[in-house]
Amino acid sequence: MEKKKTKWTWLKKFGYAFRGLFTSIKEEMSLVVHLIIGLIVLVVAALLHKQMQPLDWAVIVLVIGVVIGMELLNTAIENLVDIVAFKYNYNAKKIKDISAAATLVLTITSIVVGLIIFIPKIIAIF
């Protein structure tokens, strides 16, 4: 017999997700760096509020969320690999490096998107 799902089950799931986020923040300095940079970008966008369009805001928030989400996924993959590979393993290293590369690609992409959005607005001010 299947248990009936209640609203408390969903609340527990959100609790687990927030616990994972806080654990990652405590243990992963790169995640903290991404969060700080994301906050700085939001502050810059707020300072340029007169030039910002709703689509600009949507793109910026989406890009920040994707980069932070990828960093969380990278952290999960690295932790999983550490559990499975007890000692140095070349394939484990490749998995971790490729996962980190995915985060790097998204980070570089987010920088380019940010420059595309912000440079014309900053030039317009001067």
Image (tube, rainbow, N blue to C red):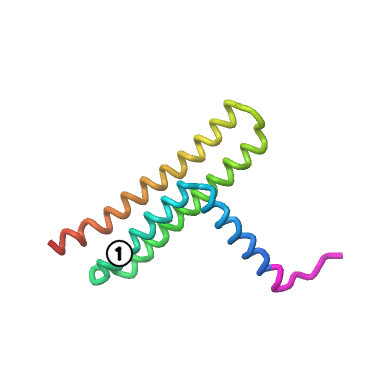
Residue 99 in the image, given as x and y percentages of width and height: 51, 40
At 34% from the left edge and 66% from the top edge, which residue is drawn? Answer: 55
User: Magenta includes 108?
Assistant: no
Q: Is residue 59 left or right of residue 68?
A: left
Examine the image and state in which quarter residue 15 appears. bottom right
Residue 98 in the image, given as x and y percentages of width and height: 50, 36
Q: Secondary structure at mark 1?
A: helix
Residue 74 in the image, given as x and y percentages of width and height: 53, 45
Of 120 and 74, which appears nearest the observer?
74
Range of the magenta residues?
1-9
Examine the image and state in which quarter residue 88 appears. top right
Q: Is residue 118 left or right of residue 99?
A: left
Quarter in which the N terminus is drawn:
bottom right
Mark 1 neighbour class, 10 Å CA radius: few under 14, some 14 to 19, many 20 or more: many
Residue hosting label 1: 45
At 45% from the left edge and 46% from the top edge, which residue is drawn? Answer: 30
